[in-house]
Amino acid sequence: MNREQTVVSIVRGKDPRVITREAISLIGGLGPALKAVDTVLIKPNFGVDMPSTTGGTTNPLVVLTLIELAKEAGAKRVLVGESSVVGYNAGKIFDFLGVREPFERAGAELVNMDSDKSVKVEVPNGKVFENIRVHRTAWESDFIISVPVMKTHFQTVVSLGLKNMKGTLPDSTKKLSHRIGVRQRKEEFELEHSILDLNSVLTPRLTVIDGVVAQEGYKPGSPGVTGSPVPMDIVVAGFDPVATDATAANLMGFDPMEVPLIKRAFERGLGEARIEMIKTIGTPVNQVRRKFRAASLEGIELTHKNLRLCVDKGCSGCRETTILALAGMEADEISGIGEAELLIGQQAEANSSEWKKILIGNCAKDLPYEGYNIEGCPPPSFYIKKCLKGEEDTIDW
Ligand code: SF4
């Protein structure tokens, strides 16, 4: 393993542009890496319409600095491309964030990959996919820079550079990668392996993690999977995507070898995850390490005291749509239900034998409880609301 693959820089400071430049400079700059490279794709996390001050999207100044660095290093074309979270459109997110003008002025082309064509790519050592559809822009780029924002995640513990690559998938494949594991009921089919199958064929050559404002925990009622902002004032950068994610996870207080996505990436030979084998340079780890709250529904207080969530490890689809449905409802709209447990996922366990059971999603249909099944994969929020309000013909709470 050479020096480039195991060195990761960490730089703390108040100016996102300065710390991004410094982080890249510490790992040797972009000059050698971009020699003979035509097209660079910078892939930020512009998945939802939240400003970077929430920790929900990548700080535009980090991206802008990378555009400048790539141009200075001689890249002929610099693209900034995104395919947002299902239900969002990257073009609208570019507008919301106000990044078109500054990015184009710096010499980049913005690519709304939600309007892009896709290509079917063989996955030679795939665990989930024998082949996978990816956006053509990503496939045809010579050098991908994954620029996630540092945050926790429901299913994958952390959402960093490897996870950020999901935004190179068309929506149909994004959905499939979330559901396939649940359907197959096998560990090796979990979401982690679909993300790693993708990374094995579309490998980020550089990962730059924006920790200017990171994000932790889970906040019900917010759009998408989201939590609370954590100002960290750091950027983490490295050429080894696994080592860079492992370093950031360590800074967030997680043992990378206990984060399945990172551990499996290491086991599959996609990079280094053992902290003792990664050399960090720049700001010392002990000056920036902070214990992040995991993104979990554990301990979430629902505003509706007559309802309780019982969730197993299934995919995030039903959890998200249920939380969103509940967040938009007044107590008197659902008082007709009485006391009820909402069971989500194929191994959810009820807490009470007294409370009514509502089985949410197709996965919960076969649970050994008598109750009403709200069908769908996932059932959309508006339909869950309709059912909870008793407005479906088949329901009589
Ligand atoms: S039914 Fe719900 S939990 Fe099951 S795969 Fe579909 S979205 Fe995920």
Image (spheres, rainbow, N blue to C red):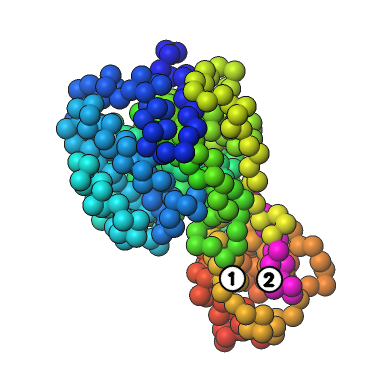
Where does the image place residue 272, in percent across and percent down from the top left? 51, 22
Q: Is residue 290 left or right of residue 147?
A: right
In which image quadrant can residue 393 be found?
Answer: bottom right
Q: Check disc 2 and give the amino acid type.
A: Thr
In which image quadrant can residue 254 be found?
Answer: top right
Q: Residue furthest left?
A: 76
Q: Check disc 1 and give the amino acid type.
A: Ala
| 203 up-or-down from 397: above or below | above
Q: Are marks 2 and 1 in contact (CB under 8 Å)?
A: yes
Between the C-alphas of marks 2 and 1, the distance is 8 Å
Where does the image place residue 301, in percent across and percent down from the top left? 71, 64
Mark drawn on residue 255: none
Label 2 SS: loop
Where does the image place residue 48, in percent across and percent down from the top left? 42, 57
Residue ID for mark 2: 303
Looking at the image, can residue 50 be seen?
yes
In percent of the image, x 44 and y 51: which residue is there? 52
Q: Which residue is at the front of the view, 298 or 230?
A: 230
Mark 2 or 1, nearer chain start: 2
Q: Tell me the magenta residue range.
A: 301-313
Q: Is mark 2 within 8 Å of ligand 1?
A: no
Q: Which residue is at the front of the view, 66 or 180?
A: 66
Q: Is residue 397 left or right of residue 127?
A: right
Looking at the image, can residue 174 be seen?
no
Please identify the quadrant where the C terminus is shown: bottom right
Reply yes or no: does residue 299 show up in magenta.
no
Where does the image place residue 294, in percent across and percent down from the top left? 64, 46
Q: Which residue is at the front of the view, 215 or 203?
A: 215
Please identify the quadrant where the N terminus is shown: top left
Mark drawn on residue 327: 1
Circle 2 Cα neighbour tier, 10 Å, few/some/many (<14 / 14–19 / ≥20): few
